[in-house]
Every structure is written in C-alpha cells, then in structure tokens.
Image: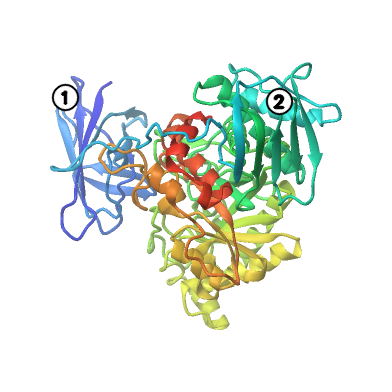
Amino acid sequence: MTLHLSQSWSPEPEGTLGTLKLTLHNLSDQMLRPTQICYTSLCRIDETSEVTGGTVIRNQGSFVALVPDAHIPAGGCLNLTLTGLIYGARTRSQGVLTAWIVERDGSCIEATLDDLEAPDGTKRGGGKLWPEGQIDLPLGLLPWPSEVEVADWAEAPQLQPAPGAPREAFQIVAALHRRLFPDAPAPFSFSAGRPVAVRADASLPAEGYRLKFTPDDITLTHHGEAAQQHGLIALAQIAHAARSDGRFQFPASGQITDAPRFGWRGLMLDVARNFHPVATHLRLLDIMAWLRMNRFHWHLIDDEGWRMPSSAYPALNTIGATRAQDAALAPQYRDGPGGQAGFFSADDIATVLQHAETHGINVMPEVEMPGHSASLIAAIPDLRDPQEPNGYYRSVQGFTNNALNPGLPRSYEVAKTLLDEAIDLFPFDTIHVGADEVDLAAWEQSPTAQSFAAEHGLASTHEMQAYFLRDIQGHLAARGRRIAAWDEAAEGGGILPDTALLFAWRSKEKTAELMAQGYDVVATPGQAYYLDMIESDGWDACGISWAGVSTPEACYAYDPGDGLPDGPGRLLGVQAAIWSEYLDTTARINTVAFPRLAAVAEAGWTPQSAKSWPRFAALSRLAPQL
C-alpha cells in the first residue's frame, strides 16, 4: 500500500457546517503525480464551499474529484482543505469513506484511511444502549401478545399437527424456523408430539388468533390465513425460546389471545444507494415474518441507482444501474473507483414476491419521481429542458438538476411507462412514487417549466410537483392502483386524499396534519423508525445523524398514535426504514437495525398498554438477524 489518507473535521468557521481537512500520505519511495484525487464522503460540499490544495472538477452526491495543485513527493504528503460544508459530521462514520488517486495512465491507487478525527472536546463513545432486560413471564413471544392468561408452565413439548390440521401450513413455519435457526431443535414434528388443532373463527379480529393450552393438546383458533400463520409462528417462537434459553418455558395450561394493533406493519429497504442481493431480501422477509410484519416497501430507485428492470428503456439497466469512475453516475458512499452495478431481473422480483407471499407479506415497489431522479435522467437524456442551466440547484444529497420537469410532456410519458412496467411486475394494489425532497429551487430557471406554470396558474415548485403527481395519480387509479408517496405529496395543493396513502417521515405533527387533511397515513418517523440513524450520542456511534439520536429505548417508547386527531384520515400503521447510504453490508445493517426493527414490529402489533421496555430488551435478544 503506497497511499494513506488522514482526515479531521472541525465546526469552524461559525455559521457553516464546518471544515474537512484531508492529508494524503505517499508511503512509497517514488513521487506520485496524480491527475485526479477522488473521494466519497458524507461531508458534502457545493459550489459555495472553499477548496484549497486542488480544483474540483466533479461533485456528484457523495463523490468529489479534484485536480491537485501539486504532486505528492516520496515519503511526503499533500493537504486539502474544504471549508463551508453543506453537510457536516457528528460521528467518525460521516467523513471520507473511500479515496484514491488517478494516475496519468488512467490507473487508480486506492488509499487506506484513518478514522475521521474529532474536534477537541468531542464526546467519545457511542456504543449500543441495549440492556439485558428482565422478563415478567417466562414466555418467549415477540411481538408481545394482547392478552396472556397462563398460570402453569412446563418444558416445551414436541408439537405435531392434529388430524385434519393443515400440514402444509405447519411445514411452511417449520421451514421458516429452520432457515432462521438452522442448528436449533425443530418446533414441529409430523410423527409424534402434543397435537395442535386448527380452527377458523370469523368472530376474531382481523389477523387475530387464540392459542388454548391443555396438558393434552393445543388449539389454534384464527381469523383467516394470515392469522393462522401468525398463530403457528407464535407457537414456534414459544417452543424455540423454551428450548434455547433457560429463562423461558412453555404454557402447560391457559390461553393467549392476540391480534395486531395496526394492519400495516412495514419495513422499507433501500437498494438504490447500495445494492443488496436477492438472498439478503429472502432472509429479511423471513425475519419480517417471524416478527409478524406484513408490508415490504422496496425502494428500488433513487439518484444513485435504478434497480428495476425496464424493457421500454433498457439504458436504465446499464447507465442507470451502474456507478463508476468514468460513468454517468459516479461512485458513491463506500464505492471504490470501480463503483458498483446491479438491478433485479423480472425473475429476481418473482422470486422475492413468491417468498413474500408464502409468508403473508405484500411487496410495494417505489418508483421515485419527480425528484431523486438522477439515475433516470442520466439514462434518458431528453428528460432535461435544454435551456435549463445545469447545476443551479443541488438536492440535499448533493445531486444537481435531479427532478423530472413537469413542463416537459416527455416526463409524463416516461413516468407512466415506468409505472406501467411496475404494475406488470408487482400485483400489490399500491405503488409508491416517492415525491420527497424536491429542491425548492427546482425548475425556477427552466423556461419550459416556467411557461408551463404560467399557463396552469402554478406559483411554486410545490404546486408544479402537485400538478405532476395528480396526473400520475389519475394514471394509477385508471389501472386500479392506489398512489403512495412521502408526506411532501400533500404540499402545493397535493394529491387527492381519497385514493392516496402517505408516509409521514418528518414528524408526528406531520402525521396529525395529514390525517386532518383526510389522508390515510403510515407513520415512519425519521427520529424514531429510521434504522440508519445513530443509536447513541458519541463520536464512535455508527450511522447517520440528520434526524438526531434514536436509541433502542426511545424507538421502542415512541407511540405513533399519541396525540393524533380522530380523522377524517386514518393512521393505518407503522413502518421502519433501512436507508443504505452507510449500510452496504449485512453486518452493518445488523449493527444498527437490531433491536430497533423488532421495536417497530412490536409498535405495529402490541397495544401500547401491554408494552414493557425491560421485557422487550430481554425478548429482542432472541430475534434473528441477517
């Protein structure tokens, strides 16, 4: 290794988000003469930032390329200073993530990295705040049920389907348990054990089930196929805990009565920022089923990558799905010069959908528009107004001119074609279209957009976005689909509430505001349910911090239904989110997602009055991870 980078961040100068100082050390005995210095970092700059030591030639998202002012002498170093950041640092994981130089022949030398050095006086530490917890009953069941009436406990018996019970349903849950816990004793036998009878009862709440235990048998009563699986998974969980942890036992007599608090118990996975393979999805769906979550929100598209197949626009699966040093989309986050590439084929999607369906999980795709569209616009160049100057606005993630232009008929044509492709791939009745974080300066210097706005009486970026989205909403409605979007879709006049589902990510107050306007809402607050947020306050905490610190206990304590209006809109449920800027591996997802994923699962299922943080802290250690 011939190149090493050290880095530090300071909050000065006052009134900015700080200064990033980089030092490239040449560890070889020969001078290095780079034509470019490249790096990726969550500390971002824009055109107003001051850079010394080099000249910026490309600044896209988290990627920066500079032409250095000098060579790097043998055994010497080169200093770069970037002042006036537009995104600062709160932890060591928010500095430079990868760095390299480009030599005259085009080859690259990658640098090893120091951690981002903290300013003097910065609080160190930042580990996981996850106590051992304490159980009040020896019942290993998570999410915790609505009612537990069990007085007698015993060792876990072997369980088998009673005559006439649906053996395939037992087999599905047995296979789920085997995948999640390959070395643990199987919860069900098909030849011996205490019989488990299964009966339907439509008088139970939707997705509700009841488990009645006697010394001789067990009866699972359920309302519907989903409830039947919930009850069998609950039995498998109880048996698994009793066999694997001495704190837990199996009910000898009594009953458990259970039903979910909300119908929507979701998890979003972002695969645009960092691509994750099908195998990771299947494992994640298994964990969701084990935690009785039933909606998988698949964030397939963003500025950094297009992951959905397209036969109408095949360049989306080459240009739009590829990041590299010399590609239209630059490397991002933890990419090296070779970047990354990938999208899901129709067969991949069918595999994910089949696995989800087996476990009662609906899959909702997100086809991001009109903002967060850098990958789409890179692949289909005629989506730009040729008279709109490039780079006059920059999104919060650092991309310029990244929104579909509502003044161009081509924008509607492409958007509707892509939504039709999503409809063909995904049977779920709701399609998410994004609609978040369009920069307020978007389209202000597009003559086409401004002419369009004047013609239709639109006075702002929000109103232009709302016009675009209402047109898209009508298109989806004509094809029997409901539009879903982030909460910004209500701004500027907004989409129509009667065929819309909004995801409130900014605050509980936003959830209340949307409901008062008549929207059905899913609560997905960044400050509580975004699993990429740091879990503790300290320089060594892992993750991103724009929404603050979300400790496991605070995540668990958050009540999405507290303080909301009676209507006219409804709170349909809750959703966790795994945004992947920092989370490029399953190990990193595991580090930050647990136990908070289980906390959101319990928020969606368990009545607030039945929750207990000490008990959850203990039980959540039994939950499987990726």
Q: Residue at x 60, y 40 (%)?
A: 148
- Is residue 324 visible in the rendered image? The answer is no
Q: Which mark is residue 456?
A: none
Q: Quadrant of the N terminus?
A: top left
Q: Residue at x 39, y 63 (%)?
A: 393
Residue at numbered disc 1: 74
* Mark 1 and mark 2 residues within 8 Å of each other at the beta carbon: no
Task: Indicate the secondary structure of the residue bearing disc 1.
Answer: loop
Residue at numbered disc 2: 215
- Viewed as shown, does residue 323 lie left or right of 226? left
Query: For this rendering, which residue is in front, 536 or 10?
Result: 536
For disc 1, the neighbor class at 10 Å (few under 14, some 14 to 19, many from 20) is some
Residue 26 appears at what percent x and percent y? Answer: 20, 26
Farthest residue, direction front: 151
Residue 117 appears at what percent x and percent y? Answer: 20, 37
Residue 201 appears at what percent x and percent y? Answer: 79, 46
Quadrant in the picture for residue 184: top right
Q: CA distance from mark 1 to mark 2?
A: 79 Å
For disc 2, the neighbor class at 10 Å (few under 14, some 14 to 19, many from 20) is few
- Is residue 559 visible in the rendered image? The answer is yes
The nearer-to-camera label among 1 and 2 is 2
Residue 334 appears at what percent x and percent y? Answer: 39, 36
Asked if residue 461 is positioned above or below residue 250 in the image, the reply reads below
Query: For this rendering, which residue is in front, 21 or 527?
Result: 527
- Viewed as shown, does residue 212 lie left or right of 292? right
In this rendering, the count of numbered labels is 2
Q: Work out whether mark 1 precedes mark 2 in sequence or the reverse, and give the earlier one.
A: 1
Q: Amino acid at mark 2?
A: Pro
